[in-house]
Image: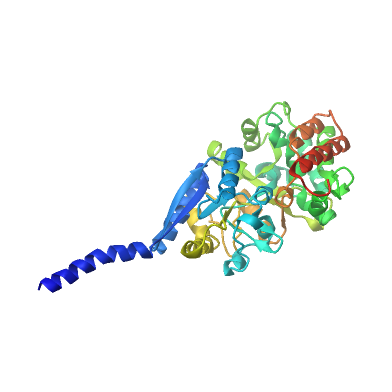
Amino acid sequence: MRKLLFSVLLLVLLVPISMAQDTVTLTYLVDDAEINLTMNQALVDEFMAQNPDVNIIVETRPGGAEGDNIVKTRLATDDMTDIFFYNAGSLLQALNPAQTLVDISDQPFIDNIVESFIPTVSQGDAIYGVPTGTAMGGGILYNKAVYEDLGLEIPTSWDEFVANNEVIAEAGIAPVMATFGDTWTSQLFVLADYYNVEQGAPGFAEQYTNNEAKYADTPAALAGFEYMQQAYELGWFQQDYATEGFEPGLALLANGEVAHYPMLTFALGTMETNFPDQVNDIGFFALPGPDAEANGVTIWMPQGTYIPQTTEGPQLEAALEFLAFIASVEGTEVITSAVAPQGPYLIEGATLPDTVLPAVQDLAAYIDAGNSFPALEFLSPIKGPNLEQLMVSVGTGQMTAQEAAENYDFDVERQAQQLGLPGW
């Protein structure tokens, strides 16, 4: 009897030890923006529910430049968490991923990822991250009621856009909204035009990065500056456009006092909050270029989830399983249940709910049709800091498109030299 009691006691003592030994604990660093934290916590909770042998502890960091420095420092000192959530594109390249991150290009879940995302998390043939969240589109938000009242069709070329604006102006409505009171909003004629740049000058991003191509002498790239000059010269903007701010401007679009707003689709979240009764009257189309047969949208990529090279053994195996979960249709459904989608997912087979905003559906249609291309900042590490001031100068008649493009090329040159890029 005493022997039996001893055996039972030994079993009771050993079981928790065995379970503890079988549980893999991961740490996951994410930024502290509410929407990102909510999304990632939902992914973690569902993954742990399905994998009780994995425990993931979420850590947070600040966003912006402070957060960038934390990520760089932790990678440089081998103190990074087992997995982390961070930008794709030029900011990821600044992490020197070939030296710091695990190459996941041989993982089967890579096939689940929409092709246009891959270059933004790659270096050479290596791939380092999976898309976590939704993409955004850069283009034209428009008031659908204005279009319906005036019998207008969605333009697929710049000439068609100009023609629509003539009809809108004749109806007494400002064709295009500018909100130069918030200067960052001035950049979309250039930044959202990159799909068209790539159609007119294929490979511009690589040539631009290698100092082999310039905005000022590449007609396809110069066009974005010229669109702003044309908008000013034709008087498309609303009254007080030079001082109008971003959020007050959204009211003008919601009420149909302006017809178009060059903007990113992230603005839809603000519109949904401030104008819930009108947000369904807002649609989206790609910034039209010179060729209606080559119409497509420039997209801003979601952030990615990455594994540092310091993650090894059972932690690495569990981390790869977590990335596979994120890069699945089921993972996107978990995100949708936690936060409202502001754009399409870049996971093959993922769908948006029927309740998603019409403008988001408009954006998703371009991507589903294969007519999308990443913004230049996801393909090149250089982006001049003074673009917004230059675009305001063009939009207020203080500078020509050609002068602004030449100034931007100089702006970029200084930045490329600071980054130590070869060829500059």
Going 51% across and 62% down the picture, which residue do you hit?
312
Report whether 44 appears left or right of 64: left
Report whether 110 appears left or right of 40: right
Up the image or down, 80 lies above or below 127; here it is above
Q: Quadrant of the N terminus?
A: bottom left
From the top left corner, tell me how far across and down residue 394 is, in percent.
Answer: 82, 33
From the top left corner, tell me how far across and down residue 206 is, in percent.
Answer: 80, 54
Q: Quadrant of the C terminus?
A: top right
Point out the residue furthest to the right here. Answer: 217
From the top left corner, tell me how far across and down residue 30 is, in percent.
Answer: 52, 48
Point out the residue furthest to the left here. Answer: 1
From the top left corner, tell me how far across and down residue 58 is, in percent.
Answer: 45, 50
Up the image or down, 341 lies above or below 260; here it is below
Going 21% across and 67% down the picture, which residue do you hit?
10
Residue 59 appears in the figure: yes
| Front residue of 275 and 387 | 387
Report whether 51 appears left or right of 123: left
| Front residue of 152 and 269 | 269
Indicate the colouring scheme. Answer: rainbow
Residue 357 appears in the figure: no
Up the image or down, 355 lies above or below 394; here it is below
| Front residue of 102 and 384 | 102
In this rendering, the count of numbered labels is 0
